[in-house]
Image (cartoon, grey):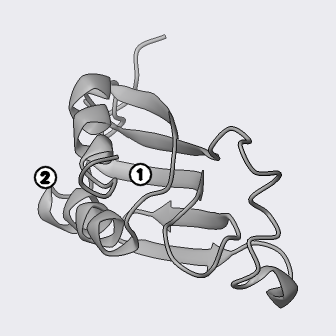
Amino acid sequence: VTPGPGHVTRVQTATLREAGRLDLELFKTWLCDLLWEREADSVYRVKGLLHFTGEDARPHALQAVHEVWDLKPCGGSEAVGTGALEGPQGAAPPVNQLVVIARSVSQESLRAEFLACFPPGT
């Protein structure tokens, strides 16, 4: 099937999975760059379940459509600062999952940029 005029033919999906806790400010800076500073309308959708350093041990859900994004903690407030979702001591670190749907996306470039969102030395 030949796409009609105005249809994008190079839409790709990149899936990133990485264990550990991200730096919230580094991640927000990267996300804003990804959504706002790249080629106009090149990123269509970003979804993820992410874990950050700091007092709030809850996973955070990310939803982004074009230039609009929302990042909210999952679960009730009882987990804030308690480490309740950390699991037993010595347990495996949480796994971050991120899906990016974009035009002409490079999985390798996105992964390198995503890894830069982890605190230095981790």
Residue at x 74% of width, y 41% of height: 91
As drawn, which residue projects farthest toward the bottom?
77
Residue at x 36% of width, y 36% of height: 7
List the residue tagged with mark 2.
39
- Tell me the SS state at disc 2: loop
Residue 8 bears which disc, if any? Answer: none
Q: Is residue 100 above or below residue 72?
A: above
- Tell me the SS state at disc 1: strand
- Residue 54 horizontal/vertical position (percent): 51, 77
| Left or right: where 18 falls relative to 118 | right
Q: In the image, what residue type sits under mark 2? A: Glu
Marks 2 and 1 in Cβ contact (< 8 Å): no
- Residue 27 horizontal/vertical position (percent): 34, 64
- Residue 14 horizontal/vertical position (percent): 43, 30
Towards the viewer: 30 or 65: 30
| Left or right: where 46 falls relative to 7 | right
Residue at x 79% of width, y 63% of height: 85
Towards the viewer: 52 or 87: 87
Towards the viewer: 35 or 30: 30
